[in-house]
Image: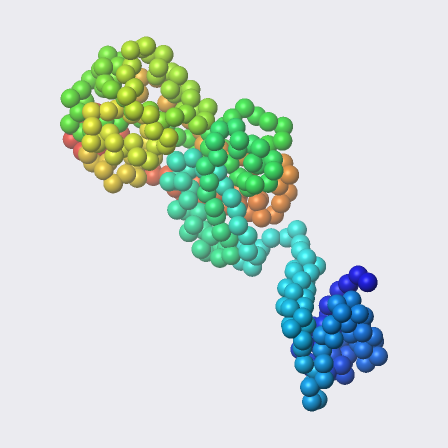
C-alpha cells in the first residue's frame, strides 16, 4: 500500500483529537471512513499505532514518530500549495546570494541593509567572492542571484545594468620620500609597488597599462584584495592603485597622500549582472531595483582630491 495525503491527515487528526469520532468530525468524514483509514495504516506499518486508553486513544512509539513526520510533511505540502510568483518583501522570507567586489561592498551594502530593514525584514543577504569567470556558471546554475562588479564581455544569457562609475587613484604614505614626484612618470616608476591580483577586466586593464609604462616597475608585494592595501601603504614606502571609494571610507585617510595615476585606464564602471532565467522573477527584480536605486546614494558627493601635498588628505 502507498501512503497518500488523506491518510496522513487522519493520523494528524487522531493525534489532535484522541478519538475516531472527534477526528472524523474535524475532517468532515464519517467514523467508518476514519476507522477504515486507520486499519490501512495499521496494516501498512504492522503496528496498532493508536490503542484505547480509557476514553481516548493512546499513541504507540511508532505512531509518535509517524505523527512528527506527518506534521512536517503536511506543513511543507501547505507551503507548496501557496507558492506564488508574487513577491512582497514585507511578508516573504528569502535569502539572496550576491558576488560583490570590494568597492560594491563599501558603496552598496550599508545602504542596502538600511533599505532591507525598512522594506524587507525577512530578506537575508549572503555576500560571496567567486573567482573570475566562475561567477557566470554560478549565475547559470542558480547558486548566485546577482554579480556586482566590472563589466565582462556581453553574454546572451546575461543581463547587466550600470550602477556607478568609479576611478582608481594612487596612494602613498603622507611622508613618502617621493611624495612630490609621484604624479610624474619618473617618480612613479622609481617607487616600489603593491598590486592587487586582477579578478576582473577593469583591474587587469589597469595593471597592464601601468606595467606597460616601464618594464622596470618594481612590484614587491601582491595581495588578493584591496581592503588591506591602505594600511600596508601607510606603514611602508609602497605605493598602490586602489578605488577612490576605498580611501574615502578608510580610517587612516588623513595619513595618506593620493595622486593621479599616469594612465587613462583609471576609470571603470560598476554594473550588476543577472541571468535571463531570473529576469522575470519578482524577488530578484525587487533586489535589482533596490540596488540600482540606492547605489548612487552610497557615493559621497565630495570626491577625493588627487593632489600630492604633504598635508592631510583634502577633499574638493
Query: Does residue 129 sit above or below 87 in this rendering?
Result: above
Can you give x and y, in whole percent of width and height, for residue 173 in the image?
Answer: 20, 29
**Residue nearest the observer in this picture, 89 or 229:** 229
Query: Does residue 224 sit above or below 127 in this rendering?
Result: above
| Residue at screen point 77% across, 63% down | 3
Which of the 4 image quarters holds residue 191? top left
| Residue at screen point 34% across, 32% down | 226
- Residue 71 visible in the displayed image: no
Can you give x and y, in whole percent of width and height, for residue 44 in the image?
Answer: 78, 67
**Residue sitting farthest toward the bottom:** 54
**Residue sitting farthest toward the front:** 46
- Viewed as shown, does residue 46 lie left or right of 111? right
| Residue at screen point 25% across, 40% down | 251
Can you give x and y, in whole percent of width and height, for residue 186 in the image?
Answer: 24, 12
- Viewed as shown, does residue 183 lie left or right of 244? left
Query: Does residue 129 sit above or below 257 in this rendering?
Result: below
For the C terminus, give its image quadrant.
top left
Which of the 4 image quarters holds residue 27? bottom right
**Residue nearest the observer in this picture, 93 or 220:** 220
- Viewed as shown, does residue 275 lie left or right of 116? right
| Residue at screen point 49% across, 57% down | 121
Amino acid at each position: 500500500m502507498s501512503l497518500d495525503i488523506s491518510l496522513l491527515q487522519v493520523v494528524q487528526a487522531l493525534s489532535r483529537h484522541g478519538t475516531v469520532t472527534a477526528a472524523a468530525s474535524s475532517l468532515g468524514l464519517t467514523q467508518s471512513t476514519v476507522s477504515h483509514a486507520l486499519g490501512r495504516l495499521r496494516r501498512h506499518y504492522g503496528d496498532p499505532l493508536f490503542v484505547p486508553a480509557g476514553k481516548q486513544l493512546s499513541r504507540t512509539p511508532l505512531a509518535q514518530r509517524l505523527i512528527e513526520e506527518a506534521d512536517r510533511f503536511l506543513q511543507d505540502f501547505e507551503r507548496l500549495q501557496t507558492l506564488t510568483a508574487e513577491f512582497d518583501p514585507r511578508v516573504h522570507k528569502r535569502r539572496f546570494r550576491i558576488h560583490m567586489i570590494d568597492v560594491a561592498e563599501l558603496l552598496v551594502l550599508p545602504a542596502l541593509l538600511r533599505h532591507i530593514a525598512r522594506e524587507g525584514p525577512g530578506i537575508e543577504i549572503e555576500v560571496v567572492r567567486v573567482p573570475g569567470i566562475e561567477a557566470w556558471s554560478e549565475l547559470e546554475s542558480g547558486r548566485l542571484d546577482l554579480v556586482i562588479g566590472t563589466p565582462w564581455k556581453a553574454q546572451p544569457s546575461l543581463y547587466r545594468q550600470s550602477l556607478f562609475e568609479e576611478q582608481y587613484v594612487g596612494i602613498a604614505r603622507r611622508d613618502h620620500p617621493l611624495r612630490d614626484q609621484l604624479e610624474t612618470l619618473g617618480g612613479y616608476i622609481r617607487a616600489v609597488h603593491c598590486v592587487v591580483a586582477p579578478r576582473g577586466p577593469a583591474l587587469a586593464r589597469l595593471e597592464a597599462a601601468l606595467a606597460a609604462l616601464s618594464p622596470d616597475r618594481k612590484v614587491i608585494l601582491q595581495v588578493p584584495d584591496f581592503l588591506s592595501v591602505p594600511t600596508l601603504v601607510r606603514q611602508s614606502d609602497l605605493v598602490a592603485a586602489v578605488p577612490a571609494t576605498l580611501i574615502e571610507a578608510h580610517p587612516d585617510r588623513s595619513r595618506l597622500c593620493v595622486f593621479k595615476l599616469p594612465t587613462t585606464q583609471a576609470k571603470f564602471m560598476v554594473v550588476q549582472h543577472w541571468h535571463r532565467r531570473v529576469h522575470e522573477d519578482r524577488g530578484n527584480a525587487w533586489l535589482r531595483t533596490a540596488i540600482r536605486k540606492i547605489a548612487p546614494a552610497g557615493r559621497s558627493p565630495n570626491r577625493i582630491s588627487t593632489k600630492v601635498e604633504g598635508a592631510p588628505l583634502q577633499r574638493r
